[in-house]
Every structure is written in structure tokens, then in C-alpha cells.
Amino acid sequence: MGSLFRSEEMALCQLFLQSEAAYACVSELGELGLVQFRDLNPDVNAFQRKFVNEVRRCDEMERKLRYLEKEIKKDGIPMLDTGESPEAPQPREMIDLEATFEKLENELREVNQNAEALKRNYLELTELKHILRKTQVFFDEQEGGLNHTTESMTRALITDEVRTAGASMGPVQLGFVAGVISREKLPAFERMLWRACRGNVFLRQAMIESPLEDPTNGDQVYKSVFIIFFQGDQLKTRVKKICEGFRATLYPCPEAPADRREMAMGVMTRIEDLNTVLGQTQDHRHRVLVAAAKNLKNWFVKVRKIKAIYHTLNLFNLDVTQKCLIAECWVPLLDFETIQLALRRGTERSGSSVPPILNRMQTFENPPTYNRTNKFTKAFQALIDAYGVASYREMNPAPYTIITFPFLFAVMFGDIGHGAIMALFGLWMIRKEKGLAAQKTDNEIWNIFFGGRYIIFLMGVFSMYTGLIYNDIFSKSLNIFGSHWHLSYNKSTVFNNKYLQLSPATSDYEGTPYPFGMDPIWQVATSNKIVFQNAYKMKISIIFGVLHMIFGVIMSWHNHTYFRNRLSLIYEFIPQLVFLLLLFFYMVLLMFIKWNRYAATNALPFTESCAPSILITFIDMVLFNKPKTPPKDCETVYMFWGQHFIQIVFVLIALGCIPVMLLGKPMKIMQARKLANEEVQPITGTDAEVGGMSNGGAGGGGGGHHDEEEMSEIFIHQGIHTIEYVLGSVSHTASYLRLWALSLAHAQLAEVLWTMVLSIGLRKEDWTGGIFLTVVFAFWAILTVGILVLMEGLSAFLHTLRLHWVEFQSKFYLGQGYAFQPFSFDSIIENGGASSGDAD
């Protein structure tokens, strides 16, 4: 089979590279992304490897680039992204890159330091300007006739002893300090001054209306100017300490008005000069950042590629001559020649004359699992890998999931309108995928939606199809083919009669099936509409579920035959399939027989009243109960001749399959081991089968080498597997009833929204009806998208995922492998620089 249905065949290879050609060859393999290297130095510390210095140099270059990126984003400069990926630079180009980054970083840091110093000076001059203006107002008030305020303030600040002494010494002179403080600190600052100085200071303050820029972090800060009057050196010292504690900035303020005016003029001149210098500094900084922004993306890619190459080279071994590097790697067999061509290109680029050597190695290790995907199948493969990566060469469920997953989702979500909304959203993401993929975002929810765009589109399309089958569009029906019912209902009957029902036994029904989907007349059957739909959806849920499980068991046959696991094929696959067919597929056949033979009209011999219950029939079959006598006017309780005998035979055969599944394989293994011990020689043809037991019986395993298990462990494992399958067949069949339950819930929610929301707006008939309907429609649309599309869609998605992981994949899929993680520049750059060496 091709790689679509199984993982790629892998080979463990040994690679010999000349030291001078190793860098170029690894670079070519990184561009190719098809080789997974193994760490041949697991016991060597990361700081003791050969190329640790080169990795450190790359780390330093990345640090400088991140600094440049931060400064560019701070200024809001767009970074050029052409979408192209430059090749990894040669080792000699590292020196040029380091010099370029060093020069840019030093220049930018110097510009930033100068700009910060200039901004600090500008802030100080601005604060001094506001102090001179505000304090001038205070002094003007004093000179303008408010001497009585100053005199009362002076009397309050002078004690009785000082006042007595001052009477003979002349007028008392008050000292003052002026400064600027953050506005939110001002109330606490004022309280501290009052308490520490015991009310012997006088504080005047005024707010600075415009915010000032903090030169350290660029934040806008609101501040206030203050001036404090006091008397004596002791209070002066105390006031200054309080100002220092609250980080208030004090500035010199002359007492004479002429000196203040002269200082203010000087400050304004210096502010104008600083504005000019600051503008030139910002222009120079902007030019440097614009030039760096043009190349920053490419620089990041180059540095990350260099770093990834040296990380990978650290996984290699050196031979004794120190001239050759030896590596071990997993490669897909189909790409063997492509890898050799890439190695040859790398050798030619490096100028080496010695070609690289790529040899296949024999190994008993399980190879990694590599499922080749494209942008369409990638999301479906991710659903499978989320459960567990497939064992090597195990059947891959992803191709079948492409059809079954959106279909089972649509069975639960079937509605033409809701499906159209989902399909259009998925189609929009598909049409815009190039632009949306380029807009990288950290929003996990959006990344999940975009990654599953093809799944969303298919789920919407399939939901529209099942919506046509259910004839359901926003809880209403489409009248495409007319109706096969002829009712004498009028408008009054439909609107005024609370209970209406359709009876196929009457002449109202033509007796012919509807061409496609459900007859739209069931919309008016308020009494038995849900009863009819429940019987229909419940049965198709069981039918789809049994067919899905049978398909899963058949898939296990492909695993057993591929790995030549005869014992699992004979003693697991065959009894499992027989058990499922004779019990549950037989129940499905009874549903089709009942639909075909029994009718609701009384004209036929097999009428509705004579139709037996499928569930009761199945229970009687398992319990070997004989059906009771037929009801009156009924010919028989059986659906066909010999039904009771056939059912007994089916149950006996199904019960006989259980001991075969339980003991068949372990007994054969025990017999083979006994013969091997008697003949004292290895047994051919059974080693893989015995080893396959350690991989689990369902899927047949990976066919690798395993140590022999104890017989007790084999019996226990087989017993658990048999019990799980037998009981799981019952529980898994019932689990598919979630298809019916969620479909019913979705339809009923849609009908509730229509009845209780939108229909209210449609009842208004005057001119206000249009306005009211617009508001109601908006509310209905929000609830429809939010509840029925998003929440119900997520619920149906999770239930579909469970049906695939548990009910379907458990029949054949182990998921015990490990993913193939090749050395790839694309994945490294997409993940932000994490290399394969980091993982190791």
C-alpha cells in the first residue's frame, strides 16, 4: 500500500561527512526536511560539545536581533517580510553578521543613551519653567495686596519666644524651597509635612496641566509644583529630608522678581535648543531602525539556520583522525535518492573533493512513524495523532476519517442554514489562507480554527447534505417536491389546533416514498413529529454505528496480514468479525426487514400493529426467549421463516467465539514454546506473532523485536482484550445513539429559537413591525451563531472525535509509535527558532 494508508518505510542510515563539507551538507538536509538525526553523544554535557562556541555566538546574535526588534516595535516601524527564506550563510559570513549586529546595537544604544540624557535635561528644564511660572503667581499675590495673608502666615509659623525676641530684632524673614512632585503622592506628602513639622510650615501647590514624559520608560506622568515656606534652619533640613523621601525634585528659585524673569528667559532658550537636538536625535534613531527593519526578518532566519546547523553537528561523532564526522539518522526509503542528491550539492558548495557516504544499517529498533501530509490532510492527521502516533507501518485511519468524521458530525448537526454558515466560514479561511497564514498570532483559539479550516468546510458541506435529508433549515422545512400527503387542513385548523398529527393509516397519505429526505408536511405534525423523527434517527444511528465498527474490525485484518501475524488473524480477527456480524449486524438487518415488510396501513398483511420491536426481539434472541403468540389479526410474531432457529444458531456461534478469542492465541503460543524447548532450536514463523502480543492484539503491532513475555502475562493480556471487545461491542453500539440524541437536541434548540424569538418579530403587522423585527432578528442571529453554530458545533465535534477515537480506532489502532521529527528549517523557523538539538 502507499504512504496514504500506512506510514512511510524508514531506514536507519549511517552518514560520513568530511569536516569541511559537514556544514554545507547539513544545511542542504535542513532545507530538504527529510532526515531525523540521532544523538550520538548522549552522555556529553551540552557545554562540552564541539560546536558549543558557535552556538553561543548565534545566541548572542539572536539577543542583539531581539533588542533591535523591540526597539523597532516600540517606534511602530513595519518590518519587511517578503515571505522568502534565505539560504543558511556560510560559516565565514558569521563574522560579517556579528560585526553588523554589533555596530547596530552599539549605535542604537548610544543614540538611546543620548536621547535619554537629553530628555532628562528637557524634563528638568520643563519642571523648572513651571516652577518659575507658578511661584511667580504666588509672589505676585503677596505683592498685590495680600500682605495680611502673609502676616497671618508668619504669625502662625513663629512661636511666642521668637515673636518676643523679634520685636527688638526687626521683621522675621521666612525661607522657602520649591520643587515638583508626582500628583498622586501630593496628599501623603502634605500630611507628612504637617505632622513632621508640627504645622510650622506653609505649603502652596499648583497642578501642571499637561503630563510630562518620564525619560527612563517613556510613561506620561502628571506632576504638581509646590513651594514650602518655613522659618529656621532646623525646619529647612527636615523639609528637605521629607522631599527626598517622597522623591520630590527641588529646584533653585530666586527671591527677586528680576532674577526669576531672567532665569525663566534662559530656561526657555535652553528648552528650544534641546527641542532641536532631540528632534535630530530622534530622526537619526528612526533612520537606523528603518534600515534595520528592512533586513530584520532575513537576519533572524539566517541566524536561526546557522544555530540549527551547529546544534545538529553537535549530535555527530568525530572519527579518530578528527577529519570526518559520523552521524546516524532515520530517512524515508522513498526519498533516499533525493537525500543523496542534497548531500552531493552540499559537497560541491563546500568545495570538498571527498563525497559523503550514506549507508543503510540493520537495526531491531522500531522506526519513527512518518505520514506524509499536505495542507488538506494535515488537519485530519493531527486529529489522529492527538490520540496517539501510529505504530510503525500500522494502518493509518486519517484517509478514512476525511469522510467519516464530517459525515458523523453532520448526522448530529444536520441543518442547511447552520451548515451553510459553517461552510462559508471555512471557505473564507481557505480562500484567504495565504494572507491569514502570514499574519502570525499568539491567539490559540484562532490558530485552532485556521488549522482546521478544511475540516470546518467539510463539516459545513456535509451538514448541508444531512440538513436536506432531514429537510431542516433553521428549524423550518423546504417544499421542493411538494407533499405526498393530502390533508383537509385550512389556516384556522393549523393555527388554532394545538395538537395535530399525521397518520399513514388514513387515506391522507399517497403511500409512495418521498423523493429525497423528509416530507415537509411533518412540520405541522405537532403531536407525532418527534416520535416519527426519533424512530428514524435512532435506527440510522445504530446502522451507521455498526457499519463503522465492522469497518474498524476489517481494518485490523490489513494489519494482521501485513505483519504476517497468523495467530492474531485466525484467533482474533475472525471471531471478532463473526461475533459482530451475527449479533449486531443481524440487528441492523432486522431493521431493514421491518421497514420493508411492515406498513402503517391496514390493507397489508403485515400491519403496524403486528410489527415487533427490534429491541425486544434482540433481547429475546440473546436470552433464548421464544416470542409470545401473535396479537389479534396478525399472522405471526416472526419477521421471516425460521427466525427463531437462526437466532439460536447465531447466538451460540457468537458465544463460541468468546473462548476462541480468550484462549486460542495464548494456547498456540504456549504450544509453540513447548515444541521449541523440546527441540532446542528457534521456531520460525511464530517469533513475530509472539512478539506481536506485546504490541496488543487489536492492531497486530509494529512487527518489531520483543523479549518473550511470561505466559501468565499473555493470558492476562488476552483476557483483558477479549473482555474489552465483548463488552465494548455492546457499549460502543449504544454509544452511537449520541448521533440521534444530539441531532434531536440541535433540531429542538433551533425550533425553540424560532418559536420564542424570531416568530415574535414576525407577528407585528403595522409600521413598527419592521423596526421590531430588525431588533429581534439581530438577537436571533447572535443566538443562532453563538449557541447553535459555535456551542452545538463544538459539542458535536467532540462527540464525533470520541466516536472515532474510542468506538472506531479501538478495533484496529494502537497508536504506540513516535513521530518522525526531521531536521527542517521550515519547522524551526515556524516554531520561533527551536531546533532539533534543543529537543535532544
Image (spheres, helix red, strand yellow):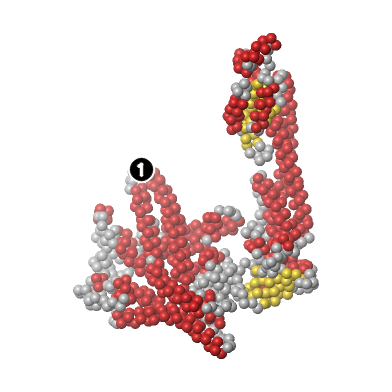
The image position of residue 552, as x and y in percent, is 46, 73
Would residue 231 be found to the left or right of residue 369 on screen?
right
| Residue farthest to the left, as pictured | 632
* Residue at the spot 40% in from the left edge and 45% down from the top edge: 775
What residue is rendered at 20% in x and 74% in y? 633
Label 1 amino acid?
Trp
Residue furthest top as drawn: 168
Q: How many marks?
A: 1
User: On screen, 246 above or below 738?
Assistant: above
Find numbered disc 1 in the image and state the secondary structure of the residue it sits on. Answer: loop
The x and y percentages for residue 592 are 34, 74
Q: Which residue is mark 1?
A: 767
Can the viewer see residue 512? yes
Name the residue furthest front.
161
Q: Residue at x 75, y 70 (%)?
A: 318
Residue 542 lies, in percent from the top left, at: 38, 70
Q: Nearer the viewer, residue 64 or 93?
A: 64
Q: Residues within 10 Å of mark 1 (few under 14, many from 20)?
A: few
Q: Is 27 above or below relative to 496?
A: below
In this orientation, does residue 146 appear? no
Quarter of the image where the N terminus is located: bottom right
Instruction: Determine the residue positioned at 35% across, 81% down.
Output: 652
- Residue 570: horizontal and vertical position, in percent? 47, 82
Name the foreground residue: 74 vs 485: 74
Image-based side of 629 in relation to 250, left or right: left
254 sits left or right of 389 in the view? right
Residue 226 location, quadrant: top right
Quadrant of the snapshot with the C terminus:
bottom right
Image quadrant assignment for residue 123: top right
